[in-house]
């Protein structure tokens, strides 16, 4: 795409197949067989990933090709309900075609049987190309609106894909047939289309806010400390423990305070100030499903969690810079740091340590201490609880993290001096 301003939508198929794809007119495809090693007599599937590069409707005729005979020359060993399906793709739609197949228990075992699909593509009306020939822009799975779809994409990524074609231009993939293992399992042999992504999932942030902003404004009053603080604190402790660095209640309290402050700050009325990530995410969720805001606890601890961490990270670095007169990171670096924190907290293995736990979220929460005061909270006691937690961390001190200990101690003394 020569025009640098041209639309280049995310490469969803490339993300799933790790770059494996073949272009057929205005669609990009890859083929997998699941499972790739199938016991004779069992059912299996050809999975065709399809990604439209066109911002108009597209019809795709798909014909499944499977072996007419096994390696011993016996015919009729492979069969299905129908070998054809017509796809009517929406503009730029991405999805997967499931083409179930069954085989006889008498089918001869062999390595490298071949399946194929024949594709005929026809554009319906005029349109423009919206993905380049490499598949499009980088796809961020965090942009998925639907948890079920995100899980399905993760499942599809585990398969091995092929972009090979035969001399007639048909996409082919190999599979192995192994010894029978038991009775055949039931499988609906009718082909199915499963949509994974449409242009509705890639609206510009401002467009999404315009479409769902009114719904978001109804949710915002519910995102207050009385409703979100305790769920956030419990989630902080659970996520850090899972990442290999359990926090004390005093430490988790300050991170939860900071996350609560981010939510209570809401959205700036200044049009020159970009909306926070969590608010854009909220609008996307509400646009996809108006019920997304009903369960506040699930909303803030699951659906908005990653974006909250990123927004809290940038806010914390900014506040720390003000009180210490020392800018640790610029805005872009702070956001990247926040993304890294999200990845570490999602890793499910030892991925956190003292500096990353305290910088900047615990420190930022300490700076914001009096801005989020809980019902019946003794703020001075909260500071003392963090001081005690820091003291218990002293055995972890080394030449690499001593500065973090010193900065935290200075912020604690600052907080104590306010009383």
Image: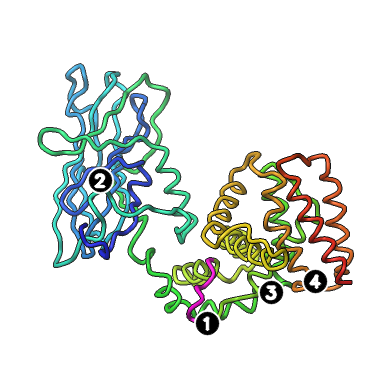
User: Which quadrant holds the N terminus?
Assistant: bottom left
Distance of label 4 from label 2 (alpha carbons): 54 Å
Mark 1–mark 3 distance (CA, rounded to whole Å): 22 Å
Total number of numbered labels? 4
Tell me the element at label 3: loop
CB-based contact (under 8 Å), mark 1 and mark 4: no
Q: Which residue is mark 2?
A: 29
271 inside magenta stretch? yes
Q: What residue did someone put label 4 on?
A: 374
Residue at the spot of label 3? 224
Choose mark 1 or mark 2, whichever is in front: 1
First in residue order: circle 1 vs circle 4: 1
Tell me the element at label 2: strand
Q: Residue at x 42, y 38 (%)?
A: 158
Residue 287 or 65: which is nearer the viewer? 287
State left or right for residue 35 relative to residue 30: right
Q: Please name the residue shown 44% across and 48% down the image.
A: 152
Residues tagged 1 and 2 counted as in contact (Cβ below 8 A): no
* Percent position of residue 363, x then y: 73, 59
- 16 w.r.t. 254: above or below: above
Mark 3, other Cα within 10 Å: few <14 / some 14–19 / many ≥20: some
Q: Secondary structure at mark 1?
A: loop
Q: Residue at x 20, y 40 (%)?
A: 117
Q: Which residue is mark 1?
A: 270
The quadrant in which the C terminus is found is: bottom right
Q: Which residues are magenta?
A: 269-277
209 on left or right of 218: left
Q: Earlier in the sequence, mark 1 or mark 2?
A: 2
Question: Distance of mark 3 from mark 2, alpha carbons?
Answer: 46 Å
């Amino acid at each position: 795409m020569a025009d640098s301003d041209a639309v280049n939508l995310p490469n969803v198929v490339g993300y799933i197949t790790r770059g494996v794809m073949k272009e057929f007119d205005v669609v990009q495809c890859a083929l997998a067989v699941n499972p790739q090693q199938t016991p004779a007599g069992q059912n299996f599937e050809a999975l065709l990933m399809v990604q439209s590069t066109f911002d108009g409707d597209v019809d795709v005729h798909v014909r499944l090709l499977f072996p007419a005979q096994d390696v011993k020359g016996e015919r009729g060993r492979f069969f299905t309900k129908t070998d054809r399906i017509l796809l009517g793709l929406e503009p730029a739609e991405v999805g997967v075609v499931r083409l179930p197949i069954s085989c006889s228990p008498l089918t001869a075992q062999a390595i490298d049987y071949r399946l194929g699909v024949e594709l005929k593509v026809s554009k319906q009306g005029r349109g423009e190309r919206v993905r380049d020939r490499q598949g499009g822009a980088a796809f961020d799975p965090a942009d998925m609106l639907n948890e079920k779809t995100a899980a399905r994409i993760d499942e599809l990524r585990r398969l091995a894909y092929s972009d090979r074609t035969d001399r007639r231009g048909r996409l082919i993939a190999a599979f192995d047939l192994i010894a029978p293992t038991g009775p055949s399992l039931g499988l609906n042999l009718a082909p199915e289309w499963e949509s994974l992504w449409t242009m509705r999932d890639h609206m510009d942030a401002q467009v999404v806010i315009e479409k769902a902003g009114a719904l978001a404004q109804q949710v915002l009053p519910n995102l207050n400390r009385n409703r979100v603080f305790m769920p956030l604190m419990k989630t902080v402790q659970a996520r850090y423990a899972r990442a290999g660095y359990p926090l004390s209640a005093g430490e988790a309290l300050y991170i939860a305070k900071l996350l609560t402050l981010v939510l209570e700050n809401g959205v700036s009325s200044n049009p020159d100030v970009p909306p926070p990530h969590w608010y854009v995410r909220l609008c996307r969720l509400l646009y996809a499903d108006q019920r997304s805001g009903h369960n506040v606890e699930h909303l803030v601890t699951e659906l908005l969690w990653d974006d909250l961490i990123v927004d809290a990270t940038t806010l914390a670095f900014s506040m720390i810079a003000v009180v210490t007169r020392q800018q640790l990171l610029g805005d872009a670096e702070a956001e990247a740091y926040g993304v890294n924190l999200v990845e570490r907290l999602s890793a499910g293995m030892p991925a956190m340590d003292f500096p990353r736990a305290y910088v900047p979220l615990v420190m930022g929460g300490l700076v914001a201490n009096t801005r989020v005061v809980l019902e019946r909270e003794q703020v001075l006691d909260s500071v003392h609880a963090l001081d005690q937690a820091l003291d218990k961390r002293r055995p972890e001190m080394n030449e690499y993290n001593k500065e973090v200990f010193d900065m935290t101690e200075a912020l604690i003394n600052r907080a104590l001096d306010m009383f």
